[in-house]
Image (tube, rainbow, N blue to C red):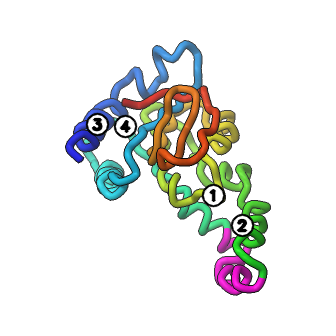
């Protein structure tokens, strides 16, 4: 546990650095960073995120978007939330998942998570990655959001591993290729 706490402290300092905020040193690559952690440390990461968002002493402005909450918002707008349980009972989990994925696609997520304004000092923080699985996959979402959020860094809190080429959710699932991000710490 102390390892993740130490890394989170480093992350807090990192997101305030001018080079991080401007994307300096990334060889013209996109300013997307992945903070990987062991899924067993989820509660510590959630606590850290809550503290980070409310920290008035930060020089950066953290804009958190919890992907699971975004999914629920999309489902509410499509009026499927209340019907989901009975739909699952009648037609099965796969049917329900397929129906949700039809309207809760990357485009719908991007519309909900992209900040209205993007100013120097802003950091888009994506959380809830594990909670939203299998309805959204972060590698696909990052591909979709990249053109919509070109001016500020995107930081993904990721319960799993990223080796610079592949994301492996929960350290168990089949890895998905994504090479445009950088390890945050």
Mark 2 highlights which residue? 97
* Label 1 SS: loop
Check residue 180 for magenta coloring.
no
- N-terminal of the pair, mark 1 or mark 2, is 2
Residue placed under numbered mark 1 in the picture: 134
Q: How crowded is mark 1: few (under 14 residues within 10 Å), some or many (20 or more)?
A: few
Helix, strand, or loop for circle 3?
helix
Residue drawn at point x = 57 percent, y = 27 percent: 165
Residue 21 in view (yes/no): yes
Disc on the earlier residue, 1 or 4: 4
Quickly name the residue at label 3.
7
| Dominant secondary structure, magenta | helix
In the image: residue 125, left or right of residue 138: left
Residue at image coords 49%, 27%:
182
Mark 1–mark 3 distance (CA, rounded to whole Å): 27 Å
Quadrant where the image shows the C terminus: top left
Task: Specify the segment rendered in magenta.
Answer: 75-90
Instruction: Tell me whether the residue at label 1 lies in contact with that at label 2, contact meaning CB atoms closer than 8 angstroms.
Output: yes
- Residue 9 is situated, as x and y percent measured from the top left of the image, at 25, 38
CB contact under 8 Å: marks 3 and 2: no
Query: Which mark lies nearer to you, 1 or 4?
Result: 1
Disc nearer the start of the sequence (1/3):
3
Can residue 125 be spotted in the picture? no
Cα distance, mark 3 to mark 2?
A: 35 Å
Q: Residues within 10 Å of mark 2 (few under 14, many from 20)?
A: some
Q: Tell me the CA gap for discs 1 and 4.
A: 31 Å
- Looking at the image, tell me whether mark 3 or mark 4 is earlier in sequence order: 3
């Amino acid at each position: 546990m102390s390892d993740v706490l130490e890394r989170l402290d480093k992350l807090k300092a990192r997101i305030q650095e001018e080079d991080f905020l401007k994307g300096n040193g990334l060889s013209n690559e996109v300013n997307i960073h992945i903070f990987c952690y062991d899924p067993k440390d989820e509660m510590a990461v959630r606590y850290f995120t809550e503290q980070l968002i409310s920290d008035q002493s930060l020089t950066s402005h953290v804009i958190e978007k919890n992907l699971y909450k975004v999914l629920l918002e999309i489902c509410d707008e499509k009026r499927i939330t209340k019907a989901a349980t009975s739909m699952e009972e009648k037609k099965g989990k796969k049917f329900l998942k397929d129906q949700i994925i039809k309207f809760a696609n990357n485009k719908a997520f991007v519309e909900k998570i992209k900040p209205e304004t993007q100013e120097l000092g802003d950091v888009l923080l994506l959380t809830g990655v594990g909670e939203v699985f299998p309805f959204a996959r972060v590698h696909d979402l990052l591909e979709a959001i990249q053109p919509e959020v070109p001016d500020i860094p995107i930081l993904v809190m990721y319960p799993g591993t990223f080796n610079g080429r592949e994301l492996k959710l929960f350290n168990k699932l089949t890895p998905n290729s994504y090479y445009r991000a950088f390890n945050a710490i």
